[in-house]
Amino acid sequence: MNRWQKRGATTIEMTLVGVPLIFVMISIFEVSRGMWMYHTAAHAVKKGVRFATVHGLDCVTNLPAVTNNCTVTANDIAAAIQYAGVGLPLGPSSNMTTLTFSSLNGSFSCPLDGSDTGVDCAGVWPPAGAGADKQGNSLRIIIKVPFPSALAMFWPGSTPVSFALTNLYADSADAVQF
């Protein structure tokens, strides 16, 4: 085999090995990024539930001088979740991180908008009435985080340079402590 034929063989070998190698590297990166986003969301929602259950409807903030009057709003809980969830996608788009609050009195959802208050949800949380705010009752918060994956560019039939959007869900529940 002469020198010119070896050059062509090297190019073909690099193509046959390089393309799958690049795909594997991008796959490792995307799976790692997805795991990081899920872990961040799970950590943030756990912090939010803990904040809600410890600061129940009538908690005491400064014993013994302050009486029971520290009501917590859904905005306060969402701000705690947003603070703990560094890197989660926020902003004014249809595909943003969404929180779902649920208790004995039902549930409601609010998007995290990235502002200082976290969301635009009014009202005290946990909601009063029907015993939802009583000590020992369960509160649950579910977080939905959009995850755009670059792996979709490699699937047959996909449009060029389009990221597939999937949602990662994490939830946490705990009993009202105070």
Image: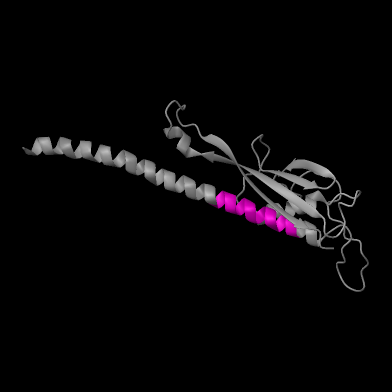
Quadrant of the image for the N terminus?
A: top left
Q: Is residue 92 above or below residue 126?
A: above
Q: Residue at x 85, y 67 (%)?
A: 61
In front of the other: 148 or 138: 138
Q: Is residue 86 visible?
A: no
Quadrant of the image for the C terminus?
A: bottom right
- The residue stretch that appears in magenta: 36-50
Horizontal and vertical percent for residue 152?
47, 34
Q: Residue at x 91, y 74 (%)?
A: 64
Q: Quadrant of residue 90?
A: top right
Q: Is residue 35 visible?
A: yes
Q: Is residue 9 above or below residue 64?
A: above
Number of numbered labels in the structure image: 0
Q: Quadrant of residue 156?
A: top left
State how the image is colored.
Answer: one colour
Residue 92 falls inside the magenta stretch: no
Q: Residue at x 11, y 35 (%)?
A: 5
Considering every residue shown, the one lying at the far left of the view is 2
Horizontal and vertical percent for residue 159?
47, 26
Considering every residue shown, the one lying at the far bottom of the view is 64
Q: Is residue 102 above or below residue 64?
A: above
Horizontal and vertical percent for residue 104?
83, 47
Left of 83 or right of it: where is 120?
A: right
Horizontal and vertical percent for residue 105?
85, 45
Q: Residue at x 89, y 52 (%)?
A: 131
Q: Main secondary structure of the magenta part?
A: helix
Left of 49 or right of it: where is 37?
A: left
